[in-house]
Image (spheres, grey):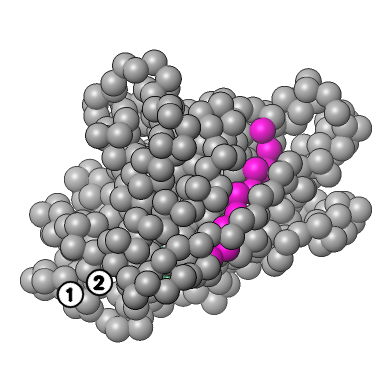
């Protein structure tokens, strides 16, 4: 491994908003250090240094009234990390764990992910420490309206285009979009992931999970393997997890588990497509919990997490950051898993990634494997700008082409002896695209 330039690691420590933000930057530095070393102009133009701080960070107070008539206050942020390649683009997260550290790491990751897609998008992320879980429908609506009034002036189709993330789906985006239209008197489709009746794209909801499976298939094919009959373990049971499950089952995989923050649902001989549909209804329409799932032959384990419990060929962590540390990675490798692809953003710690490298487990970072969501958001922006609707078929076909192009970029930039270092390939490919745009833009 190349030793990291200490001036840059010091700069990371001095400027990071917290440990997650620092770890995301260190990870990228490790990948791009050889690129910076070999291309003098990246060093001369101080590209890595200039990407450490976000271009702009906005923090607001969101005041709303709960169902008891009590005034509530939450904090909300938008981190506009880098706009060199296009409008700031990235999701909104509503969860009580949201801090500026969390959003700064997500915005940083997003800049590299968006660059890797090859599409014209800068990177940003936003959100609030408000959690929709346990709130009534009206409380969620009032919070979203207050959020849009507080932060909405930052957004615009050519400025900054938010979408969903943990705790933010079509329902929340619909309320935010409705408020933005009132505020601006313009139907501009500023957000992506909107309900289709508000200009949303057919297939955006499916895109991240479906794209993840396409990426996994590309990895398997590159290694001369296929998905047929492979046991697939999935963490999470939200947007990314359940659409990944749906497509994995449809394309011949055996999905043996899904989870939520309370426990793990295992079906050892695999969920059928119908059973995945049952889970989607439970989670997305009824807003229920996994322990309420009624699926023959499945077993719910209260408080359990997938990675120590279930053996699978392919692991798709799709819940949240740092859910797999080095000891869980050891368990995953020990259980015979050959491929780990991140549906979530940075679910694997640096230590976990090291274990996968040492144990020969093929690893795809979220920046590559989950980029289908944001790529499809760009298609939604395109649909809104032209007023020409896309069909579901066109979305999925374009998504799959994009995922295969991302895979090819990772292979090109991540050659590692006879194999591929997808982590390094993804970061390096994104970095050179951003760096060239920054150099051409001038300081
Ligand atoms: P959802 O809110 O739809 O689902 C999140 C899932 O993860 C839920 O099952 C939730 O369980 C679980 N979860 C959340 N936080 C924790 C936690 N602290 N511990 C354990 N489980 C947790 O979110 P998404 O599916 O949209 O997002 C999941 C991941 O994918 C995130 O990392 C996100 O950044 C990433 N991502 C999302 C994209 C998108 O298009 N939506 C695109 C690319 C990446 P519970 O219900 O119990 O909270
Ligand atoms: O992490 C992500 O890529 C997302 N949450 C989706 C971002 C987007 O703008 O669609």
Name the spot of residue 372 as percent of width and height, x first. Answer: 42, 38
Question: Please, is residue 99 above or below residue 213 in the view?
Answer: below
Q: Which residues are magenta?
A: 74-83
Neighbours of disc 2 within 10 Å: few (<14), some (14-19), many (20+): some
The spot of residue 406 in percent (x, y) is 50, 33
Of residue 373 and residue 400, the one placed in the foreground of this image is: 373
Q: How many marks?
A: 2
**Residue 213 versus residue 256 in the image, above or below:** above
Horizontally, residue 438 falls left or right of residue 157, namely: right
Q: Looking at the image, which is closer to me, 151 or 360?
A: 151
Q: Quadrant of the C terminus?
A: top right
User: Residue visible at 76% across and 28% down?
Assistant: 438
Label 2 sits on residue: 289
Q: In this rendered view, identify the residue nearer to me: 292 or 364.
A: 292
Q: Is residue 254 above or below residue 107?
A: below
Spatial CA distance of label 2 from label 1 is 6 Å
Indicate left or right for 6 with 65 as reference.
right
Query: Which residue is the site of mark 1?
Result: 292
For residue 349, what is the image quadrant? bottom right
Tell me, yes or no, whether the two marked residues, 2 and 1, touch with CB atoms within 8 Å: yes
Residue at image position (30%, 61%) is: 138
């Amino acid at each position: 491994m190349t030793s990291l330039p200490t001036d840059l690691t010091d700069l990371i420590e001095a400027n990071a908003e917290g440990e997650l933000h620092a770890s995301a930057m260190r990870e990228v530095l490790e990948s791009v250090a050889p690129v910076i070393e070999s291309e003098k102009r990246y060093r001369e133009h101080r590209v890595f240094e200039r990407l450490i701080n976000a271009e702009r960070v906005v923090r607001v107070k969101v005041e709303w009234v709960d169902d008891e008539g009590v005034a509530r206050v939450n904090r909300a942020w938008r981190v506009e990390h880098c706009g060199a390649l296009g409008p700031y683009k990235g999701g909104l997260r509503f969860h009580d764990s949201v801090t500026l550290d969390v959003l700064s790491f997500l915005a940083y990751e997003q800049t590299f992910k968006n660059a890797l897609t090859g599409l014209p998008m800068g990177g940003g992320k936003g959100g609030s420490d408000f959690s929709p879980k346990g709130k009534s429908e009206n409380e969620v609506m009032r919070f979203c309206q207050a959020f849009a009034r507080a932060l909405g002036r930052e957004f615009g189709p050519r400025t900054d285009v938010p979408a969903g993330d943990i705790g933010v789906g079509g329902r929340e985006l619909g309320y935010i979009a409705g408020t933005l239209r009132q505020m601006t008197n313009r139907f501009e489709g500023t957000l992506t992931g909107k309900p289709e009746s508000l200009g949303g794209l057919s297939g955006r909801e499916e895109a991240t999970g479906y794209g993840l499976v396409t990426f996994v298939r590309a990895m398997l094919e590159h290694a001369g393997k296929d998905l047929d009959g492979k046991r697939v373990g999935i963490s999470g049971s939200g947007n990314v997890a359940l659409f990944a499950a749906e497509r994995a089952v449809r394309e011949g995989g055996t999905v043996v588990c899904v989870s939520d923050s309370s426990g793990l649902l295992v079906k050892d001989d695999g969920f059928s497509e119908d059973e995945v549909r049952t889970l989607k209804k439970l989670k997305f329409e009824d807003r229920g919990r996994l322990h309420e799932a009624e699926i023959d032959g499945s077993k719910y384990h209260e408080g359990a997490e997938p990675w120590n419990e279930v053996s699978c060929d392919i692991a798709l962590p799709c819940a949240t950051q740092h859910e797999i540390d080095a000891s869980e990675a050891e368990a995953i490798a020990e259980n015979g898993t050959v491929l780990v692809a991140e549906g979530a953003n940075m679910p694997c710690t640096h230590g976990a990634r090291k274990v996968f490298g040492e144990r020969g487990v093929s690893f795809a970072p979220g920046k590559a494997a989950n980029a289908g969501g944001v790529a499809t958001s760009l298609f939604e922006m395109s649909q809104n700008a032209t007023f020409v609707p896309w069909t579901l078929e066109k979305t999925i076909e374009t998504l799959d082409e994009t995922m295969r192009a991302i895979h090819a970029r990772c292979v090109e930039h991540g050659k590692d002896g006879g194999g591929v270092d997808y982590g390094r390939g993804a970061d390096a490919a994104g970095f050179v695209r951003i760096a060239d745009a920054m150099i051409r833009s001038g300081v």
